[in-house]
Amino acid sequence: EPIMEVEVVTPDDYVGDVMGDLNQRRGKVLGMDSGTGSTTIRARVPQAELYRYAASLRSMTQGKAHHTRSFHRYEIVPGDVAERIVEHATAEAS
């Protein structure tokens, strides 16, 4: 699966929410840099988990955060995720 390098710039008040959301999306946080009132979070997240991420980020931060993303590399899909994909495809086919 494609893995994206994601950089989120968010006001400090929303760092916990953004980190929690990235973790729910199977993201791996690489680091954080704090500035004056804002924090930049760098993470790697599967592309499939970033569907509607911009809208979700705007909603959770009241439109105050923004992000960029770029392709990083391909990785093998974890077994539990692959099983869910197959189950979903099988259910749609029947």
Image: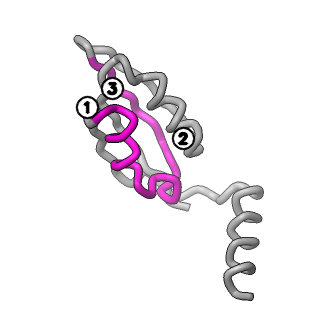
Which numbered disc covers residue 56? none
Q: Is residue 41 above or below residue 2?
A: above
Depth check, front residue: 2 or 93: 93
Q: Residues within 10 Å of mark 3 (few under 14, many from 20)?
A: many
Left or right of residue 26: residue 80: right
Q: Secondary structure at mark 1?
A: loop
Q: Residue furthest left?
A: 36
Which comes sooner in the sequence, label 3 or label 2? 2
Picture coordinates of residue 77, whole percent (x, y):
66, 59
**Going by the image, does 47 lie left or right of 69?**
right
Please give the name of the residue rendered at 40% of the width and 32% of the height, measured from the top-left corner. Answer: 42
Q: Position of residue 1 (x, y in %)?
A: 56, 61
- In the rendered image, residue 12, in percent from the top left (x then y), is placed at 34, 17
Disc 1 crowd, CA 10 A, few/some/many (<14, 14-19, 20+): some
Residue 49, magenta (yes or no) = yes
Q: Amino acid at mark 1?
A: Lys
Residue type indicated by callout 2: Gly
The residue where tag 2 is placed is 27
Q: What residue does disc 3 label?
A: 40
The part of the chain drawn in magenta is: 38-62
Residue 64 is tagged as: 1
Check disc 2: other Cα within 10 Å, few if <14, some if 14-19, many if 20+: many
Residue at screen point 39% across, 54% down: 71
In depth, the one of 83 and 16 nearer the eye is 16
Q: Quick one: which residue is furthest to the bottom in this view?
A: 94
State whether residue 46 is above or below residue 84.
above
Amino acid at pointer 3:
Thr
What kind of element bears circle 3?
strand
